[in-house]
Image: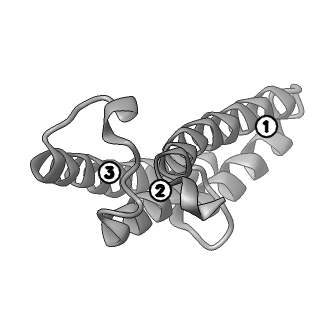
Amino acid sequence: MGLNGALLQIISHGFIGAALFFLAGTTYDRIRLVYLDEMGGIAIPMPKIFTMFSSFSMASLALPGMSGFVVLIDSEHFFLDLDYGYLPSYNKGELLNFVYYIYFCRLDILSILYSYPILF
């Protein structure tokens, strides 16, 4: 069970990682900026790329309905079978990953809202 989860993780990470790097390169080609604070948000100038970037980021977080979720469930079954107490530390890592994603989405979305004060 754990080996299946590891194999699925390798495949899922490869596809999702490649898609995220492709979207980062596309964003750089269109905006020619590297730092998030200089961009001022990408949701308004490039809504399709922002939507794809957000969905692939959520897939990387292993949210339900995405490819990483199957890997997460498969891996958790393996850790529950071991009964060594690895699962709480594994779940803390998933929580920190989600907080990290929300922090950067907040930077991007709030920079959009602050640059267009008419939306408030």
- Residue found 52% across the figure and 65% down from its top: 67
- Rounded to the nearest whole Å, what is the CA distance between mark 3 and mark 2? 18 Å
Q: How many marks?
A: 3
SS at mark 1 in the image: helix
Residue type marked 3: Leu
Residue at 48% of width from left, 64% of height from top?
Answer: 55
Crowd band around label 2 with a 10 angstrom C-alpha radius: few (<14), some (14–19), many (20+): some
Q: Rounded to the nearest whole Å, what is the CA distance between mark 3 and mark 1?
A: 23 Å
**Front residue of 39 and 64:** 39
Expressed as whole percent of the image width and height from the top left, the position of residue 32 reads 13, 40
Question: Mark 3 or mark 1: which is in front?
Answer: 3
Mark in the foreground, 3 or 2: 3
Within the image, what quadrant is residue 19 found in? bottom left
Quadrant in the rendering for residue 56: bottom left
Label number found at residue 91: 1
Instruction: Using a 10 Å C-alpha cutoff, classify the residue at mark 3 as few (fewer than 14 neighbours), some (14 to 19) or many (20 or more).
Output: some
The C terminus sits in image quarter? bottom right
Disc with the residue nearer the chain's start (3 vs 1): 3
The answer to whether marks 3 and 1 mark residues whose Cβ atoms lie closer than 8 Å is no
User: Where 85 falls versus 26 (above or below)?
Assistant: above
Q: Position of residue 40 (x, y in %)?
A: 38, 43
Q: Where residue 22 sits: x, y (%)?
A: 20, 53
Q: Residue at x 32, y 40 (%)?
A: 39
Q: Which residue is labeled 3 in the image? A: 20
The three-letter code of the residue at mark 2 reads Leu
Taking depth in this image into account, of 1 and 89 the one nearest to the observer is 89
Q: Earlier in the sequence, mark 3 or mark 2?
A: 2
Residue 72, image x, y percentages: 66, 52
Q: Which residue is mark 2?
A: 8
What whole-number distance in Å separates the C-alpha atoms at marks 1 and 2? 19 Å
